[in-house]
Image (cartoon, rainbow, N blue to C red):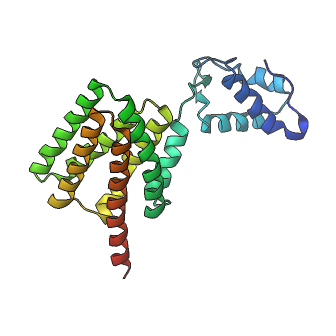
Amino acid sequence: MFKKAKQSRVFQDVVEQIQSAIIDGKLAPGSKLPPERELKDMFNTSRGTLREALRVLEQKGLIEIKLGVSGGAIVKRIDAEPIVESLALLIRSGGVSLEHLAEFRIKTEGSLVELAALRATKKDIAKLETLFNRAKVCYEKNDWENFLKTDEKMHTYIGTMSRNPVFQFVQKTIHDNIHQYYAEYLPMNKKRTLENLTDFEKIIDAMKINDAKTASAIIMDHVKRFSDKMQEKTKSKSK
């Protein structure tokens, strides 16, 4: 499966060979790479270079290195976890401005909601309405913390409704990590939660008749309005 690494770029070549074997399906998820001693001979490289290459593959989420007698380098199933973690850290660290986040969300969620409205099943609508009704209960109890959590679940579920795993991963990552922005720049109150609920009620109504264009326009306006409110708050704080 593997051949001697090119001596001019040993480290990169080891990484690329193992990565290609995993991506091409030559190494299935759950399978174990040959023992370190055998790999070292196959690649004609040092133990230190091999271990460094394996650490890089582990950081990429392609393998998991287990210690012990039955341990070794185990091939992982390829998923979006490393990307999700990186995006989550970027958002939570404040490395993304409110303006950039709003711009991205307006464009992304507009397209996402349009797909969700076209592909929504009766079961999808029922699930979304259940979450909406839960949010209404939080509104009536002035429970802003759980209202926001339920609002995040509604946005995330719309990602699921799109039936597109890329949209789904991105949507979930964003809404799992923007809670801090609301807490700092736009604390919920009766007026804001009612405005939020009204928007979602209109989106659900549009989805019931597969009116994708209307649903898309509402969510884009929704994101823009709430983002504008947060940006106004940041400006007043900086004065």
Using the rendered image of the protein, determine whether residue 224 is visible from the camera's viewpoint.
Answer: yes
Compared across the picture, whether 223 is left or right of 9 comes to: left
The one nearer the camera, 113 or 49, is: 113
Using the rendered image of the protein, determine whether residue 97 is visible from the camera's viewpoint.
Answer: no
The residue depicted at 38 percent of the width and 43 percent of the height is 213
Q: Quadrant of the C terminus?
A: bottom left
The one nearer the camera, 166 or 202, is: 202
Compared across the picture, whether 212 is left or right of 200 comes to: right
Compared across the picture, whether 216 is left or right of 27 comes to: left
Looking at the picture, does residue 98 appear above or below residue 238?
above
The residue depicted at 44 percent of the width and 36 percent of the height is 168
Q: Position of residue 19 (x, y in %)?
A: 70, 29
Q: Position of residue 52 (x, y in %)?
A: 71, 38
The one nearer the camera, 219 or 227, is: 219
| Number of residue marks | 0
The one nearer the camera, 99 or 90, is: 99
- Based on the displayed image, in which of its 4 quarters is residue 70 positioned? top right
Q: Quadrant of the N terminus?
A: top right
Q: Position of residue 13 (x, y in %)?
A: 81, 34
Q: Position of residue 211 (x, y in %)?
A: 33, 37
Looking at the picture, does residue 194 appear above or below residue 97?
above
Compared across the picture, whether 59 is left or right of 238 comes to: right
- Based on the displayed image, in which of its 4 quarters is residue 180 positioned? bottom left
The residue depicted at 42 percent of the width and 35 percent of the height is 115
The residue depicted at 14 percent of the width and 58 percent of the height is 190
